[in-house]
Image (tube, rainbow, N blue to C red):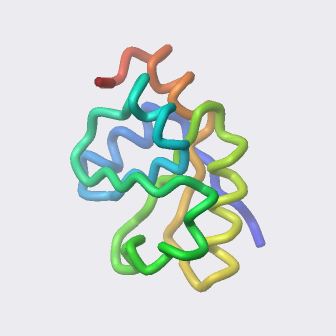
């Protein structure tokens, strides 16, 4: 099963076109620095299995974390559970903020 990865600029474009950004970082990480986008869902990776029903199946989902490693695992998990339109955000919020994209 192929994991599709996109860079932060591509991800922001898709989110602006109504894709969802799923942030799988822990609560304290999100409090320090968060993606500032519409259609944001925050579910820590440790809770994703129990909260998978909160992830939309009818929209494109971009999965992000700090650097791209946890989100890669989350993307893989979603694909194995029947999600088809899921992509991993390469470089995570580190790359997102380095590219000057909105954070809060």
Q: Which image quarter is the N terminus in? A: bottom right
* Quadrant of the rendered image containing residue 56: bottom left
User: How many numbered marks have been drawn onto this rendered protein structure?
Assistant: 0
* Quadrant of the rendered image containing residue 89: top right
Closest to the observer: 40 or 1?
A: 40
Position of 66 relative to 45 (above/below): above
The x and y percentages for residue 80 are 69, 79
The x and y percentages for residue 69 are 72, 42
Q: Residue furthest bottom?
A: 82
Q: Residue furthest right?
A: 1
The x and y percentages for residue 17 are 25, 53
Name the residue rendered at 35%, 79% in the picture: 58
Position of 95 relative to 17 (above/below): above
Name the residue rendered at 60%, 56% in the picture: 45
Name the residue rendered at 74%, 66% in the picture: 2
Q: Is residue 17 left or right of residue 75?
A: left
The x and y percentages for residue 15 are 31, 48
* Quadrant of the rendered image containing residue 104: top left
Q: Is residue 27 left or right of residue 94?
A: left
Name the residue rendered at 62%, 38% in the picture: 90
Position of 43 relative to 15 (above/below): below
């Amino acid at each position: 099963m192929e994991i599709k990865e996109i860079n932060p600029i591509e991800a922001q474009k898709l989110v602006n076109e109504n894709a969802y950004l799923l942030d799988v970082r822990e609560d304290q990480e999100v409090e320090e620095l968060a993606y500032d986008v519409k259609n944001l869902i925050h579910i820590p990776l440790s809770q994703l299995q129990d909260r998978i029903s909160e992830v939309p199946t009818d929209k494109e989902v971009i999965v992000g974390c700090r650097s791209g490693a946890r989100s890669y695992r989350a993307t893989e998990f979603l694909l194995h559970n029947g999600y088809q339109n899921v992509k991993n955000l390469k470089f995570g919020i580190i790359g997102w903020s380095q590219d000057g994209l909105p954070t809060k």
